[in-house]
Amino acid sequence: MPGMAQPDTDAPTTETVAAAMLAAVPFARTLGISFSEVAPDGVGGYRVAAELPDREDLHNHVGGPHAGAIFSLGETASGAAVMATFGDQLGRAVPLAVHAEITYRKLAMGAVTATARINRSRDEVVAELDAGERPEFGVEVAIIRPDGAVSAEMLVVWTLRPQ
């Protein structure tokens, strides 16, 4: 399909996305965020999973990951999904987070994993960029505890600002 990432040889890998994100976002390195998955999402984009380690220096007053660390994990995972999905567009557009909203559902304890996925088709977003517009799109993020329960849900709205 037009506008979709090329199969296999041009597809982003977990290693390439992790390296790019950790180089571009030093704070993610500070938090010890790692990436465990970059996989096609079925609509031309990529789903990304990122993990925040269980470290005492990241804990809050109840012994789990601090809300700010959880937010940073979700925002980082969303940025990685944007990079994986639109990496081929970065020569002509800069991805920028526009706003974010997080809902904390259950107390997080231990290491947590954020899974991020763009909520519009890649083709629609690229078509708007091709038309000279500044597309906006949401990235939905679920932050999961080790027991599989959803600890938080996040929506980060991004734009691709034409250069």
Image (cartoon, rainbow, N blue to C red):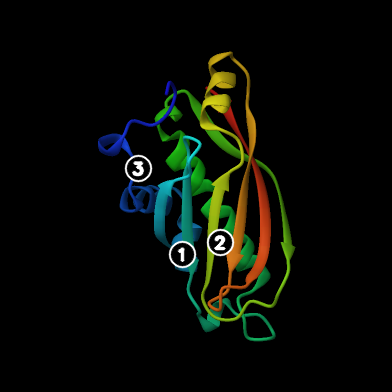
Q: Is mark 2 on a helix, strand or loop?
A: helix
Q: Which residue lies furthest to the top in this view?
A: 131
Query: Which residue is at a point 57% across and 27% down the rendered structure image?
Result: 125
Please tell me which of labels 3 and 2 falls first in the chain.
Answer: 3
**Viewer-side residue, 62 vs 3:** 3
Quarter of the picture holding the N terminus: top left
Q: Residue furthest bottom?
A: 62
- How far apart are labels 3 and 2 at the CA level? 20 Å
Q: Which residue lies furthest to the left in this view?
A: 9
74 vs 103, left or right, is left
**Residue position for label 1:** 33
Dot label at residue 90? none
Q: What residue type is labelled 1?
A: Ile
Picture coordinates of residue 23, whole percent (x, y): 39, 51
| Number of marks drawn | 3
Callout 1 touching callout 2 (CB < 8 Å) = yes
Please tell me which of labels 1 and 2 falls first in the chain.
Answer: 1
**Residue position for label 3:** 12
Above or below, comparing residue 148 to residue 95 in the picture:
below
Please tell me which of labels 1 and 3 falls first in the chain.
Answer: 3
**Residue position for label 2:** 73
Q: For the residue carrying disc 2, how many other residues have a C-alpha within 10 Å: few (<14), some (14-19), or many (20+)?
A: many
Query: Which residue is at a point 51% across and 41% down the rendered structure image?
Result: 82
Q: For the residue carrying disc 3, how many other residues have a C-alpha within 10 Å: few (<14), some (14-19), or many (20+)?
A: many
Quadrant of residue 161 in the image?
Answer: top right
Above or below, comparing residue 58 to residue 94 in the picture:
below
Q: What residue type is labelled 2?
A: Leu
Picture coordinates of residue 154, whole percent (x, y): 67, 55
**Viewer-side residue, 123 vs 95:** 123
